[in-house]
């Protein structure tokens, strides 16, 4: 037993050695216990490394995208969207929250049809509306507009946050207006449970080897781990 304990405490780094241990996940007794202990410990460590790498990549992407931002005024279409949205919210308020759940993929809801009608009515007022928003500037990505953002805010019945948009930093604009969201934190315990289930039902020799590489010191280990997590999530979605 002392030799066995010593073996598992050595923290094997070689994928083949780890794969040999993981192959006992389907056994009973002490071999399965030690395989699960190795998997749990390594999985948590590697998941932290993957999280850290994704956060670093996201931070670099934010800095890179900042160079593509420019301060500009609202376009006529953006102004009409905002004004039509305000009017629609005034008329229907919380009822707009149900639009996304109820609408057909191929058919406009009555609220969307009314939104288009209000926009058309307000086109005659565009000169006056341009003056209203004349001092409104914000950080925008080149060749991108706010129409999708505004429409999503309308039909989820959320505030436009116009003051935040106007006074925002580049980073806030990238995250909240242009979709450069920070990577989500992994739910480690949940992922581990799902991984055990996946390996118990689907796990073959190839899956065990890929998992072993992801838990090893292999230079591509985090790429393998990211791929395995996606496989498990896709498998659960299909189940």
Image (cartoon, grey):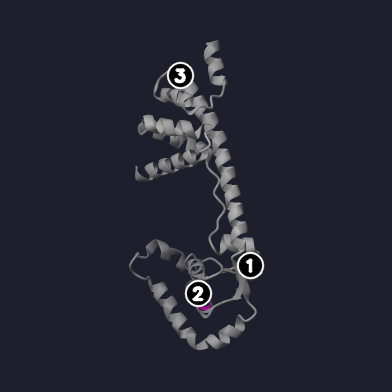
x and y percentages locating residue 8 in the rendered image: 53, 20
Q: Which residue is mark 2?
A: 85
Q: Check if residue 83 falls in the magenta segment.
A: yes
Q: Residues within 10 Å of mark 2 (few under 14, many from 20)?
A: many
Q: Nearer the viewer, mark 3 or mark 2?
A: 3
User: Would residue 31 be found to the left or right of residue 3 on screen?
Assistant: left
Q: Which residue is mark 1?
A: 164
Q: Which residues are magenta?
A: 81-88
Q: x, y (%) of residue 44?
A: 55, 34
The outermost residue toward the left is 106
Q: Are marks 2 and 1 in contact (CB under 8 Å)?
A: no
- Which is nearer the eye, 230 or 89? 230
Q: Is residue 7 above or below residue 139?
A: above
Q: Would you call the spot at circle 1 few (<14 residues within 10 Å), some (14-19), or many (20 or more)?
A: few
195 in relation to 166, above or below: above
For label 1, the SS is helix
**Rendered location of residue 94, percent (x, y):** 49, 67
> Of helix, strand and loop, which one carries label 3?
helix
What distance separates the C-alpha of mark 3 from that of mark 1? 57 Å
Considering only order in the chain, which callout, 1 or 3, is on the residue closer to the N terminus? 3
Q: Quadrant of the C terminus?
A: top left
Residue 122 magenta: no
Task: Point out the tag, 2 or 1, that comes first from the N-terminus.
Answer: 2
Q: Where is mark 3, residue-wise?
A: 31
């Amino acid at each position: 037993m002392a030799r066995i304990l010593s073996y598992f405490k050595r923290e094997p780094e070689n994928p083949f050695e780890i794969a040999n241990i993981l192959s006992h996940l389907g056994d009973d007794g002490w071999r399965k216990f030690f395989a699960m202990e190795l998997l749990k410990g390594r999985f948590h460590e590697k998941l932290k490394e993957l999280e850290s790498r994704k956060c670093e990549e996201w931070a670099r992407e934010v800095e890179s995208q900042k160079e593509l931002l420019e301060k500009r005024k609202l376009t006529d279409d953006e102004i009409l969207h905002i004004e039509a949205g305000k009017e629609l919210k005034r008329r229907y308020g919380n009822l707009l929250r149900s639009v996304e759940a109820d609408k057909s993929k191929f058919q406009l809801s009555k609220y969307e049809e009314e939104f288009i009608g209000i926009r058309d009515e307000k086109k005659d007022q565009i000169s006056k509306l341009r003056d209203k928003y004349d001092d409104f500037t914000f950080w925008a990505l080149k060749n991108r507009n706010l129409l999708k953002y505004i429409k999503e805010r309308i039909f989820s019945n959320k505030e436009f946050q116009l003051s935040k948009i106007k006074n925002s930093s580049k980073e806030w604009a990238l995250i909240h207006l242009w979709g450069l969201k920070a990577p989500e934190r992994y739910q480690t315990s949940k992922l581990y449970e799902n991984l055990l289930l996946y390996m118990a039902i689907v796990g073959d020799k190839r899956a065990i080897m890929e998992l072993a590489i992801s838990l090893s010191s292999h230079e591509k280990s985090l790429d393998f781990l990211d791929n395995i997590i996606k496989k498990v999530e896709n498998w659960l979605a299909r189940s």
